[in-house]
Structure formats: C-alpha cells, structure tokens
Image: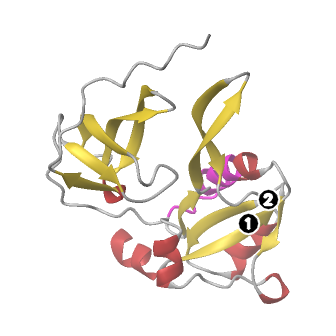
Amino acid sequence: MENARESQAKWYVLHTYSGYEMMVKSSLEQLIENNHLEDSIFDLKIPMEQTIEEKNGKRKVVERKLLPCYVFIKMIYSNQVWYLVTNTRGVTGFVGPQGRPLPLKDDEVRKMQLEPVVVDADFAAGDTVNIDAGPLAGFVGKIKKCSDTAQKATVSVVMFGRNTDVEVEYAQLRKINAELPEEAPAAPEEE
C-alpha cells in the first residue's frame, strides 16, 4: 500500500525565507511526525553541491545549497497538506501559479537529482577513475574505498599540487585503465 501511494506522489518546490531552508526542512519533518502525514509527504530535500573554497590561503571542498531559498518536497497534493505546509514558519509558499503547487516534470526531477540513481558499477579500491560530472569534472583519481549502499566512492585526486580525498557519487565516475602516479609531485619550493 505504501509503495502504491508513494508512486502517486510528485515533487514540488517550496519557497522559503533566505537562510531558513534547514529550519523549514526540520519543521516539516516534525509536522509529518506530529500529524501522521507519512502517507502524504514522502521526502524533503535541499539540493547541495560541492564547491572548492579558498580561505586564509587554504583550499577545501565545501557543501553549498544549489538553490538557496528553496526546499523540494515529494508529496500527494491535497488542500489539507497544502494548508499545513504553507503555514509552516519560514515557508513563503509553493512555486506555481497563485501559490498553488506545480509538480516538477520527470526530466526536472532527474536533472535536480532528487531521486537516487542506482548505478550497477563494478568499482573497487585501487581502480583509476575519471570524474565526469559535478564540480570536480575532469579530475582523474584513484578509488580509496567504495560504498555500494550509499552509491559513493572516496577518490584520491591531485588538487592544487597535493593529494586530496573527495567523496563522489558512482553516477559521476567512469572507470579508466590508465595508471596514475601514487603520490602528487612535490610542489616547487619558493625562493
């Protein structure tokens, strides 16, 4: 029964006040639990992206909101659910005509990566891979460890002259046969 109801659910977009995305998500999770809405609201997501940030001369990979001020919600639309969601603190309304929800199309859901993409991959530690998508596209690295359940691999790439471990989804990786040097070349010393 649960899977049949969830197959009827569609993804919608909520607009929030700036900086309220996490608070709205946790408030909605509490609303679902308190009002027993598990059969109407199935998932909440705030799409994140990994970017490289430089601070005090050091560079690191950080997670940022892909679309600030938006929370994605997978639900079966009803007037009661609309009322409860739009009256949640921090929510300004649904994205759609006159504040009424407009469901995302299937290709939009795929593009936003709201649904998990299961990749049947044969990655293993030690494999050399090319990162084909995301902020690290174009990097080549060696897999240090794999998580088939999370569909992610920890990949060691040479970034800014040194080896850096990054977590990458299987869907963004392509196995290649070329061998990489074990360590990054030493950075030239400044005089």
Mark 2 element type = loop
Q: Is residue 179 left or right of residue 147?
A: left
Kind of residue indicated by mark 2: Thr
Type of colouring = secondary structure
Q: Is residue 27 above or below residue 70?
A: above
111 to the left or right of 143: right
Q: Is residue 120 magenta?
A: no
Give the x, y percent position of residue 49.
57, 51
Q: Quadrant of residue 37?
A: bottom right
Whether residue 107 is visible, yes or no, is: yes
Residue 171, placed above or below residue 179? below
Q: Is residue 148 visible?
A: no
Give percent across and percent down for residue 59: 61, 29
The secondary structure that most of the magenta stretch takes on is: helix
The residue beneath circle 2 is 88
Under circle 1, the secondary element is helix
Q: Nearer the viewer, residue 85 or 127?
A: 127
Left or right of 118, for residue 18: right
Q: Nearer the viewer, residue 175 or 125?
A: 175
Q: Are marks 2 and 1 in contact (CB under 8 Å)?
A: yes
Measuring 26% from the left and 37% from the top, which residue is drawn there?
A: 142
Q: Which mark is residue 130?
A: none
Q: Name which quarter of the figure residue 124 lies in.
A: top left
Residue span colored magenta: 25-38
User: Is 26 in the magenta?
Assistant: yes
Measured along the vertical axis of the image, is residue 21 above or below residue 80? above
Identify the residue position indicated by label 1 in the image: 85
Percent from the top left, x then y, of residue 41? 56, 66
Q: Identify whether 165 is placed above or below 122.
A: above
- Residue shown at the point (18%, 46%) measured from the top left: 178
